[in-house]
Amino acid sequence: MQRMILFVLCIALLNCDNADNEVLWGSGTLEATKVLVSSQVSGIILEAFVDQGNQVNEGQLMFVVDTVKLALQKEQAKAGLEQVAVQRTIARQSIELAREKLDLAKKRYDRISALSEKNSATQQQLDEVKVALKAAETQVETSQNQLNVLKAQQNQLQAQIKLVEQQISDAKINAPLFATVLEVYVERGELAKPGAPMAHLADLSEMTIDVYISEINLGKVRIGQTANLEIDSFPDRQFPATVVWVSEIAEFTPKNIQTKEARADLVYAVKLRLENPEGILKIGMPADVYFQ
């Protein structure tokens, strides 16, 4: 009887020890930062310097789009700018002439007005100089407005030239980050369209993985905590990772979990990040995450 009691106590102690040392784990698939590269301008693709599987550095030239039409638009705007410059010179001369006429009209008005006060000028003469003065003032105002309109046209053409220059610059599509080319969607000679995808890039130097933890175990996970990943493709290796994000909102287990019972559970998403300096880890690889 004593031996039986001792045996039961040993089993209980072993169970308690296993419960205390139970490893928290989860499973998911590896992901990476992905970027879709597209053109901002329309034109024939003159050069395509990348292919699937290539690595590109940040700022590396990937595609060149034809800019002949854009160059013609720039030349047209520059010609318009030169024309406006000539018109502005003429408008300034018109203003000077109108101001001279206005000065003469003011002097004549002042003289006739003084004579009228002495009854040495007729009312008709006074009315005539008033009309002439008003006409001179209107001419100055009209000439000034014309100069203002030409200034606005000059600003518009200068902005148009800057826009075309930016579009010409955008015709050279560079890599936005150091990455691996996953897909190339265009070929040399095809028409590039604004916003249409040209290539798909991914930064494989750093991977992420999302796992889902039940509410009961959520207290065992914290940002900055380390974990080890085990991947079927590399059975003899473990890959260190760090928790970088823990969801604040519970959700139902994702549908890629196999059983309906498991999918009905409320869980919290946990994101981990790991380095991939050798480039051996790939997007979509399944992995088991064991939290330390």
Image: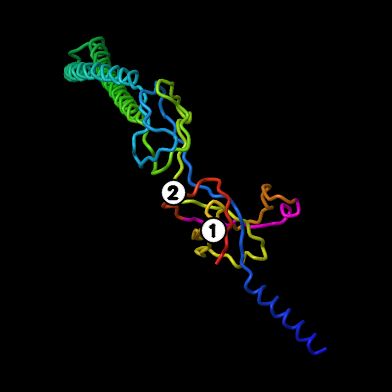
Q: Residue at x 45, y 30 (%)?
A: 198
Nearer the observer, 181 or 169: 181
Q: Is residue 237 left or right of residue 43?
A: right
Q: Is residue 139 left or right of residue 260?
A: left
Residue 41 visible somewhere in the drawing: yes
SS state under label 2: loop
Query: Where, by quadrant of the figure, is residue 97 drawn?
Result: top left
State which region is magenta: 260-274
Q: Is residue 233 left or right of residue 105?
A: right
Q: Where does the image place residue 284, in percent across and percent down from the top left?
A: 55, 46
Nearer the observer, 204 or 171: 204
Q: Which mark is residue 187?
A: none
| Disc nearer the start of the sequence (2/1) | 1
Residue type at mark 2? Gly
* Magenta stretch secondary structure, dominant: strand
Number of disc labels: 2
269, above or below 151, in the image: below
SS state under label 1: strand
Residue 111 visible somewhere in the drawing: no
Q: Where does the image place residue 189, in percent across and percent down from the top left?
A: 40, 20
For label 1, the residue is: 229
Residue type at mark 1? Leu
For label 2, the residue is: 279
Q: Residue at x 32, y 19 (%)?
A: 68
Nearer the observer, 84 or 250: 250
Other-residue count near label 1 (Cα within 10 Å), few / some / many at <14 / 14–19 / ≥20: many
204, above or below 213, in the image: above
Q: Is residue 111 left or right of residue 227?
A: left
Q: Where does the image place residue 245, in percent across and percent down from the top left?
A: 53, 57
